[in-house]
Image (cartoon, rainbow, N blue to C red):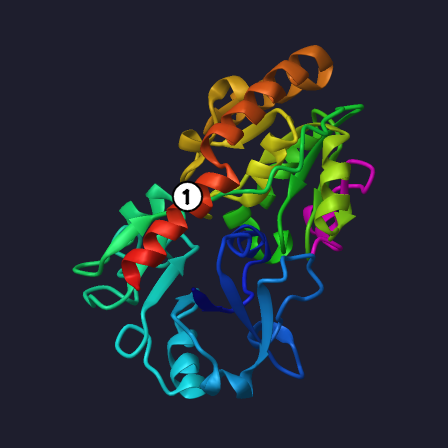
Amino acid sequence: MKILVWHVHGGWMDAFVRGGHHYLLPTTDRGGPWGLGRAGRPWPETVQEVPVEQLRHSEIDVVVLQRMEEMDAVELLTGRRPGRDMPAIFVEHNTPKGAVPHSIHPLADQRGIVVAHVTHFNQMMWYSGRAPTVVIEHGVPDPGALYTGVLAEQAVVVNEPVRRGRVTGTDLLPQFTAAAPVTVYGMGGEQLAGSLGLPEHRLRWGGDLPASGLHAGLARHRLYLHPLRWTSLGLSLIEAMLLAMPVIVVDATEASRAVPPEAGAVSCNMAELLNAATLLLNDPGEAARRGKIAREAALAHYSLERFLRDWDVLLHECT
């Protein structure tokens, strides 16, 4: 089928567009969040860029929404209202904001659009009323077991850690640097060390790298840190597990479902996490052993094949 979908979350899209459908990605002269298209990604030929002015004349079987603003954008550009004139699915990538646990989803109590959550935690925490909901957990293309752990250091992947602060657990990083240097990869980390009052030899920004470079860089670190407090399950955590990295994870949101303790450590107790990190940093053999467990868990739970099967079922049900 032909699916209209905006390129919003690159990691999620990297999995979604590998299914057996045709994917129409809007483009504009300015690009940006409303016209990014493929953005140079090596996606299959079934991923087609469509100038927004051509959408009104394009054959579309279903729209997969990811932002509430897309409801009006689709109607403006196609003349068809999602959920009324066109089958629609809304992917909820985020944990609820504001008055948790009383947060009401913007699509609560309507019945025309299925809300597809990416974690069971999110489905439970959002109030959706009569709106139909489903969970389709993440699927991640397997980068391979690239782990070497040759650097007795720690790695994190997070976008905009300075702006997002406590949400991403940025304030926890200084405690981990007491065990070994930390390198943070992702967008907007240039001022991170200065904002935390740390020297750059203890906390470094590794840059915003393409997937292949990121995987190669991560795999050289002894362990992966996941300090996030209040976000959906990070795709970078799953990718690190697939690389066969041991993981040290703050036990929040979906973490305990995604990560077996034997894969590293999962806890809300900072002392326990620091002790586990120190153990793995000083014992490469144990780090490698736990990394293999992490990879096995990620392959079993977050395979690309399972993700695409789940989406096929939902797409056919909705159309």
User: In which quadrant is the C terminus drawn?
Assistant: bottom left
Is 93 magenta? The answer is: no
Q: Which residue is located at x 55 percent, y 42 percent?
A: 140
Specify start and end residues of the magenta stretch as a single range.
Answer: 188-204
Q: 262 above or below 250? A: above
Viewer-closest of 68 and 192 = 68
Residue 177 point in image, percent of width and height: 70, 32
Classify 10 Å Cα crowding around label 1: few (below 14), some (14-19), many (20 and above): some
> Does the image show residue 154?
yes
Residue 132 point in image, percent of width and height: 23, 57
Question: What residue does disc 1 label?
Answer: 137
Left or right for 317, reference 305: left
Q: Which residue is located at x 68 percent, y 66 percent?
A: 39
Q: Secondary structure at mark 1?
A: loop
Residue 114 point in image, percent of width and height: 29, 60
Left or right for 25, reference 4: right
Q: 315 above or below 62? A: above
Q: Which residue is located at x 35 percent, y 63 percent?
A: 89
